[in-house]
Amino acid sequence: MKELIFVGRSEDNLELIFMDEDGGEFAVAVDDHIRRSINTNDTAAVTTTDSGISPRDIQTRIRRGETAAAIAAEAGVDAERIERYAGPVLAERSYMAKRAAETLVRRPHGEVVLGELATGQLANRGVDTLTLVWDSYRRDDARWTVTVSWASGSGGGIASWIFDPLAKSIVALDDEARWLFDEATGATAAANKTEEPKPRLVGLPTVSEPEAEELEPPAWAGPGHPTMPVPMPVATPAPTPAPVVAVDDSPSWDDILFGHRPNDQ
């Protein structure tokens, strides 16, 4: 027979969700028989252990993010005595982390699954995505803090979000989570590098010299500082010389026939 671990209720509270060791999920409808079984006082579940902490308190503290080792050290007992009550709660935390990683988030180009977005960003940074560990713990306001941690070089990192299972919303809680939301960073940042502007030729308008008659005479500078206007010289065209009439000194027929000109006396 396969052993199942209770991880929580469905969103509509009509089913109980269980998980096996392989991560498979199973749902059981909540009927009257289940309700009577849950409401039956189980003294074994509320009695105080030899550590001085009840199983319910142990599960509550682990659900809020504490570890079995820390609780055992505080109680002064072996961790195994605490871990026997931690199994169902750890499965619940794993289940909520899985749901958060499968949540769709809106990006400029459309919706993308959070887990895929985080894995892609970390891979661009050079992180071995096989080292990613998703976890969650319950907050006092019934929402969940979801984390993803990774190893990188000599250190590592962790990003945190606030996950609301009912609203199916997720909000970045720290700078690392906001960085994972920002797809423009990481390996693609080089593509956004601003290029140096290249010089280009710009045509200048042609300025024509004003004609002499278009120039305005200078005005008086004002009382006490008279300034006489200086007339601008105007170029005067040179006069055209009169045409020269050539005189014909060759002898006429009178000179040839009579030996003198008609005007000679």
Image (spheres, rainbow, N blue to C red):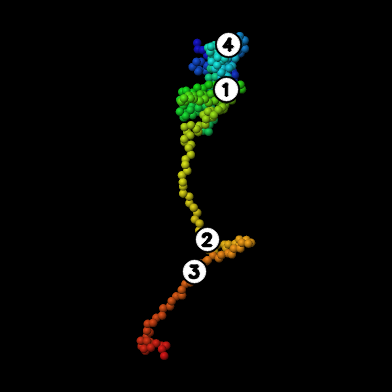
Residue at image mark 1: 144
**Amino acid type assigned to the residue bearing label 2 in the image:** Pro
Counting from the top left corner in percent of width and height, residue 208 is at 50, 58
Residue 40 lies in quadrant = top right
Q: Is residue 107 above or below residue 86?
A: below
Q: Earlier in the sequence, mark 4 or mark 3?
A: 4
Residue at image mark 2: 210
Visible residue check, residue 225: yes
Q: Gap between marks 1 and 4, in whole Å? A: 28 Å
Q: Earlier in the sequence, mark 1 or mark 2?
A: 1
Counting from the top left corner in percent of width and height, residue 19 is at 52, 16
Q: Nearer the viewer, mark 1 or mark 2?
A: 2
Q: Residue at x 53, y 19 (%)?
A: 94
**Amino acid type assigned to the residue bearing label 3 in the image:** Pro
Q: Secondary structure under badge 2?
A: loop
Residue at image mark 4: 51
Residue 261 lies in quadrant = bottom left
Visible residue check, residue 37: no
| Number of the label disc, if any, that sits on residue 237 | 3
Camera-nearest residue between 209 and 108: 209
Camera-nearest residue between 37 and 246: 246
* Residue situated furthest left in the rendering: 256
Q: Residue at x 54, y 29 (%)?
A: 175
